[in-house]
Image (cartoon, grey):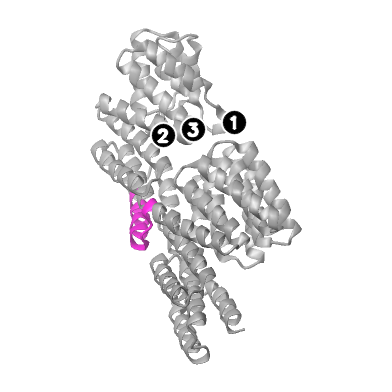
Amino acid sequence: NPNNKYQECGNRCQGFKKDKISLVTGLYEKKYVVLVGSSEYFGYKIASLRNVFQSLGEYQKAKEYYEKALAIATEIGHREGEGTCNGNLGTVFQSLGEYQKAKEYQEKALAIATEIGDRKGEGTRYGRLGTVFQSLGEYQKAREYHEKALATATEIGDRRGEGTTYGNLGTVFQSLGEYQKAKEYHEKALAIATEIGDREGEGTTYGNLGTVFQALGEYQKAKDYYEKALAIATEIGDREGEGTRYGNLGTLFGSLGEYQKAKEYHEKALAIETEIGDRKGEGARYGNLGAVFQSLGEYQKAKEYHEKALAIATEIGDRKREGTWYGQLGTVFQSLGEYQRAKEYYEKALAIATEIGDREGEGTYSANLGSAFLSLRINRQAKDHFEKALAISIEIGHRKMEACCYGNLANLSRLFHDYQMAREKELKLRSSPGKTSLGIVPEAHVILLGFHCKPPEYVAFGLWEWMKCPMIAECEVNFCLMIMSERRSPLLKCTRPDTPKKSTCCI
């Protein structure tokens, strides 16, 4: 079967380096024209070529080939091919951060699968729509679609589909901060991958479990799982997977404050992604390295790396990542005390999040803008942005963002001398999930409230813990120390001698 032969060839081509891609493309097109000449097979050939470009992060080229394949499938009346191409276009638009378009194409693919009675296709499209809604920060909708995908896979006995969907549900629960549930679903996915001998799926799931344990603060377990995932990627020759796992380990070491190790692992990941021509991966890695330099206080280097990440996102048309790197550059400028520039970058990030319908991004950048306005002492606008972020966090079930917003609003209430309101916000903050489930220390916010809240030892606790919480700015700590000094507070002797480091209000 010529189609199977060239489809297999196309899949194998995904591992080629970028400098060989023109040769592969020319060989493909020439052989297909000579050996097949059929519109239907030509359409499938084009669909195989897009696998090559998509795996290399060249989404615009992948999109062009999908569109050609879709046109041919429509011309010859091949409904299954139409559905597949619509779904694949949806995946490309999702990679490009164009989530509304991704949703439209996946819905077309779902409609065709339902029309022709393709149950497996239906399940696949439910799952793809679930990932789109997850990218949009609409986690409850994402969960509903993944559950439909799971029901379909179970009904038709598609074990691989079941495993994939358990993994997707695990990532949804992780996004919702429900880490125990996330762990349970990832473990189900791992059991199925092991049962059916899906080594790639095993590796992916080990990596997912690593991120869960990292979020729970169980760093040794996270490291063990990332290393298992890396070993499998190396064993099966999955270079992209190797890069991802090195990046995971880099992020883990960054969380542990081992920034030199973090830098080494991110650089290993970057080398692999450059070698295989994974532009999206390169961009992500430059951003990760920027974050490491930012943690080291090397803000100019951080700025350079975030700008490289932004340039790649712009080049490949990845709108969501563009917004991400604008936001990260905003945090760099805020750390440098350039609050006006920070505000401008946060506004760019917020505009993109709003444009593509990324609700989580809208909440994050609204909170960051609130922080910038607070630093600029434009307190009313700061309050408006924190309240907007709070509303979004409650809407999408993002508990970490919710806790951050309550803390910031409590701080603002103090500035407005509304101590009763500050107390109410502080109580809501303390009722939010704590250290274990969030990996943050909400109690640190009492440093801003201890002058009118009891018991007073909370102030000492806050001063001891503030550096663990990225939501407390240096100016606020200094303000508290100044007030305590004026009141000759005995709690001053409880504070650390270290000079506080600058921090931002980024979520």
Residue 442 higher or lower than 226, as above or below: above
Residue 475 higher or lower than 307, as above or below: above
> Splitting the image into 4 quarters, where does residue 200 fall?
bottom right
| Position in image of residue 347 (x %, y %) | 28, 42
Q: CA distance from mark 3 to mark 1?
A: 12 Å
Residue with the mark numbered 2:
392
From the viewer's perspective, tell me whether residue 413 is left or right of residue 26: left
Which residue type carries mark 3?
Lys
Residue 307 higher or lower than 428, as above or below: below
Sequence-wise, the earlier of marks 2 and 1 is: 2
| Helix, strand or loop at mark 3 | helix
Is 319 one of the magenta-colored residues? yes
Which residue type carries mark 1?
Thr
Residue with the mark numbered 3:
400
Q: Residues within 10 Å of mark 1 (few under 14, many from 20)?
A: few
Q: CA distance from mark 2 to mark 3?
A: 12 Å
Magenta residues, dominant SS class: helix
Q: Which residues are magenta?
A: 303-321
> Splitting the image into 4 quarters, where does residue 349 fall?
top left
Residue with the mark numbered 1:
436
Which residue type carries mark 2?
Ile
Sequence-wise, the earlier of marks 3 and 1 is: 3
Q: Residue furthest bottom?
A: 34
